[in-house]
Image: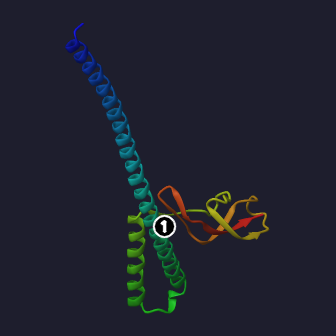
Amino acid sequence: MTQTEQRLDENRSAAQAEIERLTHELSRERDMHLRTRADFDNYRKRVQRERDSAAQAGKRQLMLGLLDVLDDFERAFAYADTAPASILAGARVIHQRLRDLLQAQGVAPYTSAGQPFDAALHEAVDVIHTDQAPSGVVLDELSHGYRWGDEVLRPARVRVAQ
């Protein structure tokens, strides 16, 4: 082998080693790039979930406040006998609009009277000793319970038979 051939062979070996080093480095950089993209995508999704959760919590507080107003309307209607008919009619329209607004947001009342007591759905505020209903059955509601989609927005405040 001549000296020129030997140098060419050394250059080829050096070039092959450099190609392998660069290929390895490129592979490592590609992996880092893919990991960085995946980390950023996960970060973006987490931030979106947190933002949605914060918005949902704020909306939940608003819905609970509106339910209190709805309860106030219902209590007022219990004493509406002395109110002029025109004021009562206007109050009923506002009450219905409020109910429609809540319903459009997915808030719906549920019935508790006559149902077995369920701590997830009911808040027992009184126990009544009676023979007219089986023990553990809800006798009446002091305030309605509401669902928001699949979750309980506000449990019903009830009296339970014992």
Does 61 sit above or below residue 89? above
Q: Residue at x 59, y 66 (%)?
A: 155
The residue lying furthest to the left in this view is: 4
Q: Residues within 10 Å of mark 1 (few under 14, many from 20)?
A: few
Does 65 sit above or below residue 149? below
The residue lying furthest to the front in this view is: 3
Q: Classify residue 135 by image quadrant.
A: bottom right
Q: Secondary structure at mark 1?
A: helix
Q: Quadrant of the C terminus?
A: bottom right
Q: Residue at x 56, y 69 (%)?
A: 144
What percent of the width, then of the height, locates residue 104? 38, 65
Residue type marked 1: Ala
Q: Residue at x 52, y 82 (%)?
A: 72
Q: Classify residue 132 by image quadrant.
A: bottom right
Q: Quadrant of the N terminus?
A: top left
**Residue at mark 1:** 57
What percent of the width, then of the height, locates residue 150? 50, 55
What percent of the width, then of the height, locates residue 102? 42, 69
What percent of the width, then of the height, locates residue 68? 52, 77
Q: Is residue 151 left or right of residue 25?
A: right
